Amino acid sequence: MDLRKTQMSRKQRGGEERGGEMQERGREQGRKYFGEKIGLYFAWLGLYTQMLIPASLVGVIVFLYGCATVDDNLPSMEICHPKNNITMCPLCDKVCSYWKLSTACGTARASHLFDNPATVFFSIFMALWEKDHPRAEYELRVMQKTLSKDQKSHHKTEKLTCQDRLPAYMTNIVMMLLMIGVTFAIVFGVILYRISTKAALYMSSNPVTRSHAQLTVKTTAAIINLVVILILDEVYGAVARWLTVLEVPKTDKSFEERLIFKTFILKFVNAFSPIIYIAFFRGRLVGRPGSYLYVFESYRMEE
């Protein structure tokens, strides 16, 4: 029996070694056939896929924690408790009726599954998970800086004065402000869409349409917002590169830094403007019963 176990363990170790050799040989053959870049990409992709396993496990644990503590969540308990089933003001004028707080019980419980105290730990974990030791990147930057200095010593380029660069700088400022203004205008347009569509659905004679008005408005507005963000993301990337080329930076490092700065500003405003509105402004610019705030004197601000 001991001899058989020893032979089985040797076979298992041999199989594992052969599996590792085959995997390494496959990467080497891919590198030789497709080239260095493709081979490096597939090697990185395999490592990245393996590193997703701990992140996904932590995410599942956080979700299960939300499921286990949903009955102990104080806001959900207060909303769902029969004693706190107070009558709320209508969500729109004329066609909307009063509603009970208990109707939001399901939404409050569902939100706790994804937004609970454990999500703070998950955010910290993901922030640490995505980071790697920057030694290789630092060495690459030092090498690029050394090469750029050597090239400067051999080549003398014609310097542009501040007067030559002034039109490009002014164009950059105007275009950046214009793109940010476009983003704010689109966010405001989506807000108007939600307000007007909700009012139109509540005026419908179909009771099913009225009962699902909130869900319909939120779903369609989220889809529109996502499509607009994806489109503007590509547009802003091209605009940032065009504006950086227009400035004619002196070095590749300066070009990269300016491109990253413009891209970050435009894409940050594009991606986070709706979130900032929801977090800091939505529900705070409503007014009070009897003196609500209206947009264009017709549309009441959403709560």
Image: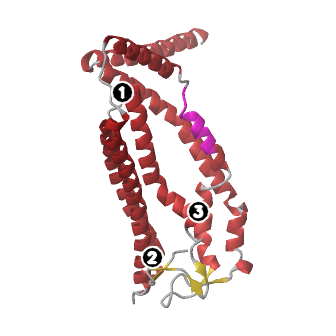
Query: Along the polypeptide, which appears first: circle 2 or circle 3?
Result: 2
Res. 42 in view: no
Residue that badge 1 annotates: 250
In this image, 13 relative to 243: left or right?
right
Image location of residue 279, percent across then percent down: 57, 61
Q: Which of 186 and 302 is in front in this view?
A: 186
Which callout, 3 or 1, points to the residue nearer the camera? 1
The amino acid type of the residue labelled 1 equals Lys
Image location of residue 102, percent across then percent down: 64, 77
Residue that badge 2 annotates: 195
10 Å crowding of disc 3: few (<14), some (14-19), many (20+) = few
Residue that badge 3 annotates: 280
- Which residues lie in the magenta part? 122-132
The amino acid type of the residue labelled 3 equals Phe
Which callout, 2 or 1, points to the residue nearer the camera? 1
Q: Toward which corner of the image does residue 34 lie, by quadrant?
A: top left
Residue at the (49%, 54%) spot, across then down: 272
